[in-house]
Amino acid sequence: MNFPQTNLDLLAARVQKLEAANHRWKFVNALLLLSGVSVLLMGAKPADRLQPNVIRAGSVEAQEFILKDETGHVYARLSLNPSVPKPTQKGRTYLVPSDTIPGGEAALQFYNEKGEVLWTAPSLGGAQFVPAR
């Protein structure tokens, strides 16, 4: 009877299968580890561009342009519908329509920290720009 020899052959075949499965698992784990490390390294890479996104355009159309700080305080305004500043609340300036500059005429206004008009073009006093001939 060859009983011990068949047990050894069965045992050797099982060990070979287990070793093959072990090698597959090691390979899969190594790939997962490598991909995880590469994802971490790609996330840790500094940005290619340090400047904020800038939109470049050939032309821009608008009724008005307002220059504000992060709190909402208005410092300058270029508009077709001129306004004068209303008293400020919590550091914000509110603009109300002006009766001194006719609507539809472009006006450039600069404001101080209190929301008061520092300078307006054309001036609020009525001086008008006259086209050159």
Image: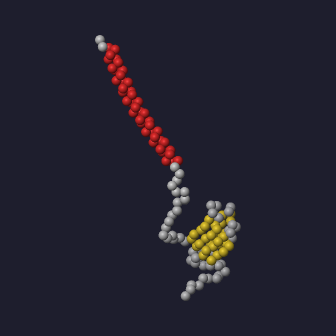
| Colour basis | secondary structure
> x%, y% of residue 57?
49, 67
Residue most extreme to the right: 114
- Horizontal arrangement in the rendering, residue 111 relative to residue 9 (left or right): right
Q: Is residue 101 above or below residue 14?
A: below
Residue most extreme to the left: 1
Residue most extreme to the top: 1
Which quarter shows the C terminus? bottom right
Q: Is residue 54 above or below residue 128?
A: above
> x%, y% of residue 73?
65, 64
- Horizontal arrangement in the rendering, residue 105 relative to residue 2 (left or right): right
Q: Residue at x 34, y 14 (%)?
A: 4
- Horizontal arrangement in the rendering, residue 8 relative to residue 40 (left or right): left
Which quarter shows the N terminus? top left
Q: Residue at x 43, y 33 (%)?
A: 26
Q: Is residue 88 above or below residue 129?
A: above
Residue 104: in sight, yes or no? yes
- Horizontal arrangement in the rendering, residue 24 relative to residue 110 (left or right): left
Q: Residue at x 49, y 47 (%)?
A: 42
Q: Quadrant of residue 101?
A: bottom right
Q: Quadrant of residue 67?
A: bottom right
Total marks shown come to 0
Residue 94: in sight, yes or no? no
> x%, y% of residue 55?
51, 64
> x%, y% of residue 82?
61, 74
Q: Is residue 127 above or below residue 87?
A: below
Closest to the observer, 59 or 12: 12
Q: Residue at x 66, y 75 (%)?
A: 119
Closest to the observer, 7 or 129: 7
